[in-house]
Image (cartoon, rainbow, N blue to C red):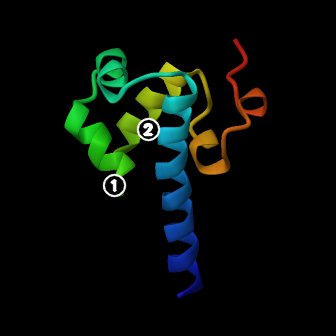
Amino acid sequence: MHRHRETEQQMKALRENLKLFREERGWLIDELSQLSGIDRQTIVSIENGEDIEAAQLFTLSDIYGIKPHAFFLGPDLDSHQEEW
């Protein structure tokens, strides 16, 4: 039961941070859809609690220039940015 609760908390953080990262950049869902190639409705669904595919998570992390685990940790972008 504890592991299930932890997973739920991680998925909640993921959803909230996906939206937060998008809003911090001033992007509308349509803009993120165009940049990522992910369908607009899919982004809406993910932000509203649907599961995200690993490929989508990696695509979005590339678009944002962050490591995928940053979506689970929060908006402190400086500590999660990719080193180029």
Give SS at disc 2: helix
The residue drawn where x is 49% and y is 59% is: 11
Which sits earlier in the primary sequence, circle 1 or circle 2? 1
Going by the picture, which residue comes out furthest to the top?
Answer: 84
Q: Left or right of 31: which side holds 41?
A: left
Residue 2 sits above or below residue 47 on the image: below
Label 1, label 2: how far apart the Cα atoms are: 10 Å
Classify residue 35 by image quadrant: top left
The amino acid marked with disc number 1 is: Asp
Which residue occupies the foreground of this view, 24 or 6? 24
Which residue occupies the foreground of this view, 35 or 82? 35
Mark on residue 60? none
On the image, the x and y values in percent for residue 49 come to: 36, 57
Residue 42 sits above or below residue 59 on the image: below
The residue drawn where x is 50% and y is 22% is: 26
Mark on residue 51? 1
| Neighbour tally class for label 2: few under 14, some 14-19, many 20 plus, Cα within 10 Å | some
Identify residue for label 2.
57
The amino acid marked with disc number 2 is: Leu
The residue drawn where x is 59% and y is 21% is: 65
Classify residue 20 by image quadrant: top right
Residue 6 sits above or below residue 35 on the image: below
On the image, the x and y values in percent for residue 83 come to: 73, 18
Going by the picture, which residue comes out furthest to the bottom?
Answer: 1
On the image, the x and y values in percent for residue 57 come to: 44, 38
On the image, the x and y values in percent for residue 84 come to: 69, 11
